[in-house]
Image (tube, rainbow, N blue to C red):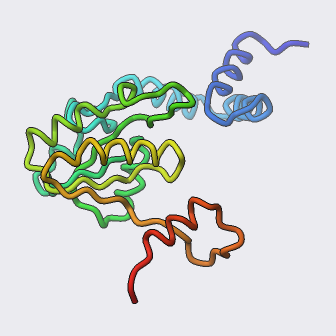
């Protein structure tokens, strides 16, 4: 027996989400069926509202305007740019309430295994910002993955010709970690970033 067509379409839509398989998609579809009509309407309006979202013309972050709230904030330190992979990274850093500079969202990573090069990420506009704005420091906050490291090294090498400070977020062993469980990259970074005490 097959599901009614509209219900199957709903399941198929949920399956398009990252990490959602058939069973999870079915559960979500049944959850929607159990919602009140008001909640379903809110759900529809939220999905439709995402069509209004765009990328900031300056940094590439999510925004409802051409310029995001961070780039338009005159109280931010516009001489410092934190480079991240995705908008979700911006929101994660902002929750800390420690960083008060601006951002540059690459919206991807260099991944040779997936044929993704610097042309597939929001990289050229970063160079334009460095050349046109009074940038003093670039903080590379890409993910600690092979792709993230490749992306950070590429950007760092390209920025060496400019008179700016280039830093990378410190990383290594987390609190409570055991050496024998750490992977090679984590141990390497822990030794590379060691500090005098």
Where residue 184 sits: x, y (%)? 62, 61
Q: Tag count in the figure?
A: 0
Residue at 46% over, 65% down: 171
Q: Is residue 20 above or below residue 138?
A: above
User: Furthest residue to the right?
Assistant: 1
Which quadrant holds the N terminus? top right
Where residue 89 sits: x, y (%)? 42, 49
Q: Is residue 68 above or below residue 142?
A: above
Q: Nearer the viewer, residue 61 or 106?
A: 106
Residue at 53% over, 49% down: 145
Image-based side of 98 in relation to 7, left or right: left
Does any portion of residue 21 appear in the rendered image?
yes
Q: Nearer the viewer, residue 9 or 60?
A: 60
Does any portion of residue 76 appear in the rendered image?
no
Where residue 194 sits: x, y (%)? 44, 76
Q: Nearer the viewer, residue 181 or 162?
A: 162
Where residue 20 sits: x, y (%)? 69, 34
């Amino acid at each position: 027996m097959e599901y009614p067509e509209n219900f199957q379409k709903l399941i198929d839509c949920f399956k398009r989400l990252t990490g959602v398989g058939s069973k999870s998609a079915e559960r979500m579809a049944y959850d929607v069926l159990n919602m009140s009509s008001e909640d379903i309407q809110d759900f529809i309006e939220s999905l439709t509202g995402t069509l209004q979202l765009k990328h900031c013309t300056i940094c590439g972050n999510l925004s409802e305007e051409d310029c995001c709230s961070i780039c338009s904030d005159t109280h931010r330190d516009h001489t410092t740019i934190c480079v991240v992979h995705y908008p979700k990274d911006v929101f994660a850093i902002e929750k800390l309430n420690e960083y008060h500079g601006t951002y540059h969202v690459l919206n991807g990573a260099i991944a040779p295994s997936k044929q993704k090069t610097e042309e597939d990420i929001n990289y050229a506009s970063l160079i334009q910002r460095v050349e046109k704005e009074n940038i003093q420091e670039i903080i590379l906050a890409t993910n600690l993955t092979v792709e993230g490291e490749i992306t950070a090294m590429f950007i760092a090498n390209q920025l060496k010709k400019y008179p700016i400070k280039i830093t990378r977020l410190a990383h290594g062993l987390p609190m409570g970690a055991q050496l024998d469980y750490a992977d090679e990259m984590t141990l390497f970074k822990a030794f590379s970033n060691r500090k005098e005490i």
